[in-house]
């Protein structure tokens, strides 16, 4: 059972455009929602994360929007650059019960983003 | 520099052979994790460990084994019982506990191919 569903699977955007990736989750116990960025042949790296007590978090050109009632969250990449071309993963975990859950992350299926110059 | 190292970067194995993937971290993290990544799919948790000499199965533990004899090391053995072992394997670590939300740091990965 896939607990975090991510869409689209791939995305092509022109340089300067906005990339939008959406994720939906099922487990209402999730209380930590990070986004990871992965370049080919490399391990993922944390990009930005949000907790459910806020509806939006912005870091530079990257913004997470969170809708708790809809159980959805999204990543917006503003002014997309060719260097942003990578695979992006949303994830969720129950950090509040870290000792029991072991800080386990449940990942979405990933979105491959290509920014054309 | 602090970080996570995985070796080897590429690994080839014949069917029926066991193979061990190395993961070492010098971040002084208590927790370590192993994930499997298949093309076009997200990361799936194989095993995780929060403390030395203790580990728990993740979502896809069948055909894999781990050990945690040292805080810095968390090797993964892919046994011959794993039916489809060809994949990209990622090791991660994090702190445990505290009041903050604990980021997982990932290694560069090992690509395993079964011939």
Image (cartoon, rainbow, N blue to C red):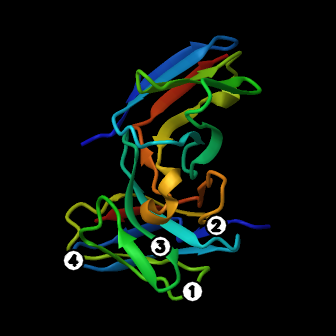
Question: Do discs 4 and 3 belong to a common subunit?
Answer: yes
The reply to whether the C-beta atoms of the residues labelled 2 and 3 are less than 8 Å apart is: no
From the viewer's perspective, is the residue at label 1 or at label 2 nearer? 1
Mark identifier at residue B4: 2
Label 4 lies in what chain? B
Cα–Cα span, label 2 and label 3: 15 Å
Label 3 lies in what chain? B
- In terms of secondary structure, where does tag 4 sit? loop
Which residue is nearer to you in this view: B31 or B88? B31
Is disc 3 surrounded by few (<14), some (14 to 19) or many (20+) residues within 10 Å?
many
Would you name the residue on which mark 1 appears?
B70
Q: Earlier in the sequence, mark 3 or mark 1?
A: 3
Label 1 lies in what chain? B
Cα–Cα span, label 4 and label 2: 29 Å
Which residue is nearer to you in this view: A84 or A31? A31
Cα–Cα span, label 4 and label 3: 27 Å
Cα–Cα span, label 3 and label 1: 11 Å
Is disc 2 surrounded by few (<14), some (14 to 19) or many (20+) residues within 10 Å?
many
Would you name the residue on which mark 4 appears?
B16
Find residue A85 and report its horizontal and vertical position in percent.
60, 29
From the viewer's perspective, is the residue at label 3 or at label 1 nearer? 3
Would residue B72 appear left or right of A103 to someone viewing this image?
A: right
- In terms of secondary structure, where does tag 3 sit? strand
Q: Earlier in the sequence, mark 1 or mark 2?
A: 2
Would you name the residue on which mark 3 appears?
B49
């Amino acid at each position: 059972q896939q607990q975090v569903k991510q869409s689209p699977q791939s995305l092509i955007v022109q340089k300067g455009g906005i990339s939008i990736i959406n994720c939906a989750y099922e487990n209402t116990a999730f209380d930590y929602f990070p986004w990871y960025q992965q370049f080919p042949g490399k391990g993922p790296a944390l990009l930005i994360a949000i907790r459910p007590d806020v509806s939006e978090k912005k870091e530079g050109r990257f913004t997470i929007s969170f809708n708790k009632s809809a159980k959805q969250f999204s990543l917006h990449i503003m002014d997309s650059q060719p260097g942003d071309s990578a695979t992006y993963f949303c994830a969720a975990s129950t950090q509040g019960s870290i000792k029991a859950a072991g800080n386990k992350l449940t990942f979405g299926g990933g979105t491959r983003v290509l920014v054309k110059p | 520099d602090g970080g996570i190292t995985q070796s080897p970067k590429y690994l080839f194995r014949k069917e029926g052979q066991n193979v061990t993937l190395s993961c070492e971290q010098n971040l002084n993290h208590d927790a370590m994790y192993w994930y499997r990544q298949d093309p076009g799919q997200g990361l799936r948790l194989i095993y995780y460990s929060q403390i030395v000499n203790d580990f728990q199965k993740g979502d896809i533990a069948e055909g894999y084994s781990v050990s945690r004899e040292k805080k810095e090391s968390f090797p993964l053995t892919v046994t011959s019982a794993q039916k489809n072992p060809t994949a990209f394997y990622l090791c991660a670590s994090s702190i445990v506990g505290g009041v903050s939300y604990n980021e997982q740091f990932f290694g560069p990965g090992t690509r395993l191919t079964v011939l």
